[in-house]
Image (cartoon, rainbow, N blue to C red):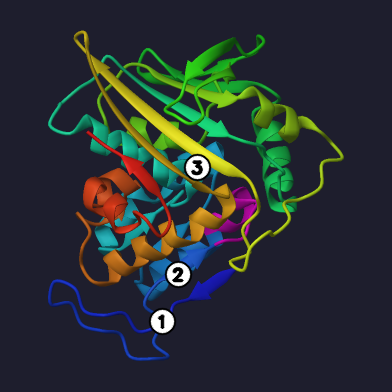
Amino acid sequence: MIAPLTRQYSPVACAPVPEAGIVVAVINCAGPFASTSAPVIEAALRARIPYLDVAAELEANLDTFKHYAERAREAGVVIVPGMAFFGGLGDLLATAAMGDWTAADEICIAYGLSSWKPTLGTRAAGQVSRQRREGRRLVFTKGQMAFRTDAAPVAEWQFPAPLGKQPVIGEFTMADTVMIARHLKTPEIRSYMTAVAVKDLLEPDAPPPVAVDENGRSAQTFLVEVVVRSGGNERRASAGGQDIYAISAPLVVEAVRRVVNGLVHGTGVLTAGEAFDARDFLESLRQEHLALDMP
């Protein structure tokens, strides 16, 4: 459950380079995070080292902010939950799109997945989340999280080329919503997932993803688009790539690199958009990991 970083990183902003063998941060990659986050965070706080995880479970992320924000700030420790495809990436895109705007009328996130063969971890985490919310859906509306019991709306979303117009399932709330709501001022956060991906996710006998290249990535492709609207104006930012699970690794490792080298905005429990320079962070992953289009 606990992954100590022993790799040496190049110095950035005059920060010291950790010696080999010294634990400088913890990355929690073991879900369900409803069970693992708290004990690993407690260990990180005792050791006074940064904690990051890749949790996509909304409830686990909300718990981390609720129970550890004050303690982490008082201890001077950085905690960044959800530093993955679901959570960190959407938050960084929304923060970059927001730019110098201080508030927005709404923020929309559209996930364009070509398919979604869930891992065993995704299935286990999803089951825990459904049990905790008793089968209800979570949405962010009128400035707060709210439960919904009706059927999710069906719509269409015009993604950038080459994906184009796609049928989507609305109110598909993921960890991005929790993160964005923490620091970007908006009353409405709307989220959409391509219908083909939802169909795959709901298939009980769907096999887990299969590697198709030397990097262990599956054939799945993704395109995440964020639209920020304010007073009749809008700004868009998007990121595309291959394999939503594979992209989580470079996201969280880049986050750790920045944290241990002092390139982080403050201490306490922070979202990706709060913790880092969003545009610079995304640019660091351009070409090798992400195709980007930002305002």
- Per the rendering, the mark at residue 26 is 2
Residue appearing at x 72%, y 43% in the figure: 117
The quarter of the picture where residue 60 lies is top right
Estimate the x, y position of residue 278 in percent, counting from the top left: 25, 46
Q: Is residue 45 left or right of residue 58?
A: left
Q: Position of residue 241 (x, y in %)?
A: 48, 47
**Image-based side of 100 in relation to 78, left or right:** left
What residue do we see at 69% from left, 32% from top?
A: 130
Secondary structure that dominates the magenta span: helix
Instruction: Give how far apart the Cα atoms at labels 1 and 3 are.
Output: 26 Å
Give the residue type at disc 3.
Answer: Phe
Residue type for callout 1: Val
Q: Amino acid at mark 2?
A: Val
Give the residue number, with chain letter if any, for mark 1. 23
Q: Residue at x 45, y 35 (%)?
A: 224
Viewport quadrant of the N terminus: bottom right
Vertical order, 107 against 35 (above or below) = above
